Amino acid sequence: MYRMGRRLGLLLLAGLLVVLTACSSNNSSTATNGNGDSEGKTTTLKFFHRWPNEPRNSYFNYIKEEFEKQNPGVKIEMESVLNDNYKEKIKVLVSSGDIPDVFSSWSDSFAESLVSSGRVEDLTSMFDSDKDWAGTLVQNQLKSFTFDDKIYGVPFTMDGKVFFYNKKIFNKLGLEKPKTWDEFIALLDKLKAAGYDTPIIEGLQDSWAVGHYLGTMNQRMLSPEVLATDYAVGTGKFTDPGYLQVLKYWQKLTKYMGPNATSVNHEATRNMFIAGEVPIHYLQFAELGYLKDKPDLEFDYFNFPQFSEGKGNAEGLTGAPEGFMISKETANKELAEKFVKFIVSPENAAKFQKDVGSMTTVIGAATEENSPPGTLGAIEVIQNAAETTPWLDNAVDASVADAFMRGGQAIAADIETPEEVLKEVQAAAAKLQAVKK
């Protein structure tokens, strides 16, 4: 009996050791190469981003595979969902504490809302401890991820929004780039008189496209002080008369976009511009890659014109970077930083530029050889912008942005007046104030 009891005890002890060993690995398993960490385990890093579509999907698959290849014993567990679904999911993950080690984020108010959870890592030391790496990034893009003088994100893509125009049409009609709103309206009238019934187009089915217009128009019209107060959660009232004037100007502008603008999306209208059917389109520099598909398209661009009564910076540029954040709760901070630096390295940024055709914040990543025509000029515009303004849905709370964007659609469809839409914006802001109290 004694021997049987002793043997049983040894077996139980051995089983317990197996269980304890398995539990202590925590997201890890024994690796044959032994380079995952000092104990020879596979270290898993969760990475969540918002680009499941091509060509970005292939690029990030390459990043995952190459990083794993260069770091034996490391596994990148990658997941991605598109835009609005990503916005919802990352907010849920952050608020629940089930936050990925590394994740992508829009900048400004969206990033700030994640930071306010207290679960996003302060990356200031990452920049301070590696000045050579930090110096490879376009510095004016960092402020979009800086809150209370601390840097919470590494910007990767950068962008700007301007009016692209068909040079052949402009040259044929002897038209010049407009600098003021009045000159812009006069230009549209001349194009209509020349037979272009739709001199400018936008896919107003996409509410974000409306937001891009209204965000820029607010920046041009309102003083920075008014915008700072109204855009902050809990202090916004949107009672300045300039907001109503912006909505009235928006109503006027949509009359030049033709009867079908509210029933088509941005991609469709962009294709109309590329095909030469419409002389002007409000586009992001990130869309330059699509324009190369029609080599005979001759284009140039101009910034949003200033309003004569405007109080904002006429040289400001709308556009915001996107980048990567790291969980404050990650058990592998050093590895997470290494992974982010790998993505935002000059070599991989150049590959992103070549494969995706979009600009990055990495200085020198774009060249004449790996970029669509117009890219280097666009980068110069972004780097030298007197002021950069985030997209409206990044600048204000989602409820206020939604009131502006859906209201802008309703104005274009003649369903609501500018006065009615502004009341909805003010009501959304008032709810935020009530919640803050």
Image (cartoon, rainbow, N blue to C red):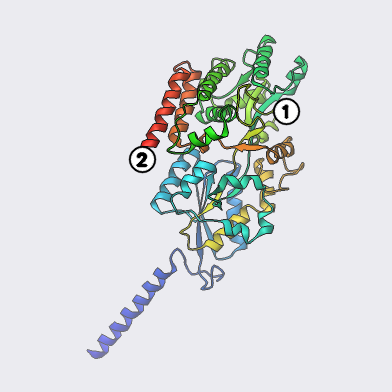
Q: Quadrant of the N terminus?
A: bottom left
The disc at residue 437 is 2
- Kindly give the residue lying farthest to the front in the view shown: 225
As shown in the figure, which amino acid type bears the numbered disc 1? Asp
User: Outermost residue toward the left?
Assistant: 1
Q: CA distance from mark 2 to mark 1?
A: 49 Å
Q: Which residue is mark 1?
A: 300
Q: Is residue 59 visible?
A: yes
Compare residues 140 and 367 and report the one nearer the observer.
140
Q: Earlier in the sequence, mark 2 or mark 1?
A: 1
Image point (67%, 58%), residue name: 131
Vertical placement of residue 324 versus 306, above or below:
below
Callout 2 secondary element: loop
Residue nearer the viewer, 56 or 247: 247
On residue 349, the disc is none
- With respect to residue 8, does 249 lie above or below? above
Label 1 neighbour load within 10 Å: few <14, some 14-19, many 20+: some
Residue 172 relative to residue 233: left or right: right
Q: Nearer the viewer, residue 40 or 154?
A: 154
Residue at left offset 68%, top offset 14%: 191
Q: Is residue 257 left or right of residue 2?
A: right
SS for dot 1: strand
| Quadrant of image for the C terminus | top left
Q: x and y percent of residue 351 in the render? A: 68, 48
Kindly tell me whether residue 66 is visible in this rendering: no
Q: Residues within 10 Å of mark 2 (few under 14, many from 20)?
A: few
Residue 266, compared with residue 51, is above or below; it is: above
Task: Give amino acid for label 2.
Answer: Lys
Where's residue 92, x and y in %? Answer: 41, 47
Residue 113: x and y, percent? Answer: 46, 45
